[in-house]
Image (cartoon, coloured by chain):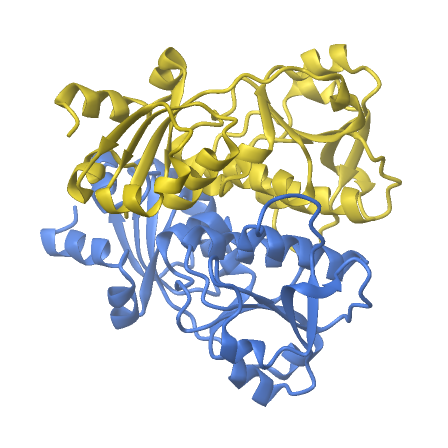
Chain colours: A blue, B yellow
Amino acid sequence: MLSKSQVKYIKSLSIKKFRTKHNQFICEGSKIVKELLEIQSFQIDILCATEKWLLDNNHLLNSYSGQLVQLKTQDLKKISNLKTPGEVLAIVGIPEFSFKKEISKKLCLYCDNIQDPGNMGTILRIADWFGLPYVFASPQSVDFYNPKTIQASMGAFLRVNHISCELSKLTELFPEMTIYGTRMQGKNVFKHDLQKNGIILIGNEGRGISENNAQLVGEWISIPSGGGAESLNAAVAAGIICACFKNL
Amino acid sequence: MLSKSQVKYIKSLSIKKFRTKHNQFICEGSKIVKELLEIQSFQIDILCATEKWLLDNNHLLNSYSGQLVQLKTQDLKKISNLKTPGEVLAIVGIPEFSFKKEISKKLCLYCDNIQDPGNMGTILRIADWFGLPYVFASPQSVDFYNPKTIQASMGAFLRVNHISCELSKLTELFPEMTIYGTRMQGKNVFKHDLQKNGIILIGNEGRGISENNAQLVGEWISIPSGGGAESLNAAVAAGIICACFKNL
């Protein structure tokens, strides 16, 4: 059983302010929690699960040293952010990432003020699919640990390093990396001679790339349009550009 | 003012059963309603708007012959599906589309049991961006007029023909069209000799392409992965494949 104050505390972690304050976030669903237990690179502080889940997954708990709370399904519902709550929920410590030298040799994504948590999760999933090891996001972007981001990422946040920082910090640390921006007048991404490393900017859903960051762009690219839409969804655009960088 | 029964009726249109029964759907937001009034190819039955919106857009109402209801912002809130209701909402008749001969010469999308209305809207937006004039969807898919689909399509449903039908109906009508399916073992879409026409299948978010429809596939293609994710989001995959068909 969880006390009322514990329920309140866990529920508070669905709000960014409290995630930042306590440096913790929520992970839900059997698949993702099992992966968390297996990879052991994230610190799980509390694991809430049904008796059945704990019995079925006992083998994964040998090296787990955090708090374990056995709950009934209806009690899990009280702390869940999902429409259909699963059998397990974990309270996980927010990891710290550092700016390793290898970044300069990689193809990376930078989210410039992405606001939709579903888009952010989908962008992490795209990076995971194409083997991009780093996703950066401006401090104004939706945070990586929003419950909807975690859900949409389908576990990608476990494999893709994700760091919140200004783009100018990256250009200071890695001046040799080309910053790629997308705009209508950019060079067709299918005809461009793309590099194996660099930083691809993903602009905000409504306003695109911010003025400050546009000044740091070294190469402008575009996805050719043949129809009437004014723009593509931010995550779809990110997917097409990553696919071109990795396959052209 | 709207009567209680009118409010109830309009709110009922956010549910598929009632949209089908009354053959009407809801369109919200100034940009999209202005476009509806301009193109005149959809029948608007009721237009609910604030006094200010009606004054500002009076020039668009000359040829409008449906019902006009002036509402206060707080009354619009009562019938809105948006978190931040706009100044105008239209009740629109569901249009009928026919299977024109030209379809066989076009590149089309077919949604095989797409369940997420946001994905469906994004797929329409992708078709619109790349100039694909037809999007088909299996009868089991989320319908095109779900309020979240309409929002996510960003007006694309106005320009892209969208028809609910079985895939087998399309193969009967247009046996000369190649059906493209996506699976891991398919040929790299970046290396494939793609045609200018055909039907690209977009599989369900969790289960992919259904068994029945897989039997109709003529060419299997794939988006090469270099990372750990098991799959891409359905709309992102659709975007990458359309980009390849249009630009390779």
Q: Is residue A190 left or right of residue A46?
A: right
| Position above or below: B122 against A196 | above
B29 or A18, nearer to the observer: B29
| Residue B91 locus on image (x, y percent) | 35, 26
Does residue B231 show up? no
Q: In the image, B245: left or right of B203?
A: right
Check the image and report above or below for B169 versus B11.
Answer: above
Determine the residue positioned at 75% across, 41% down.
B222
Query: Residue at coordinates 64% horizontally, 38% vertically from top-left?
Result: B127
- The answer, for residue A207, to whether it is visible in the render is yes
> Is B183 or B203 nearer to us in this picture?
B203
Residue at screen point 65% across, 87% down: A175
Q: Position of residue A125 (x, y in %)?
A: 56, 53
Against A124, is B190 above or below?
above
Q: Quadrant of residue B21?
A: top left
Quarter residue A29 falls in: top left
Q: How many marks?
A: 0
**Which residue is at a point 20% across and 21% down the rendered structure image?**
B6
Left or right: B31 as drawn, with respect to B13: right
Which residue ends up furthest to the right in the rendered image? Answer: B193
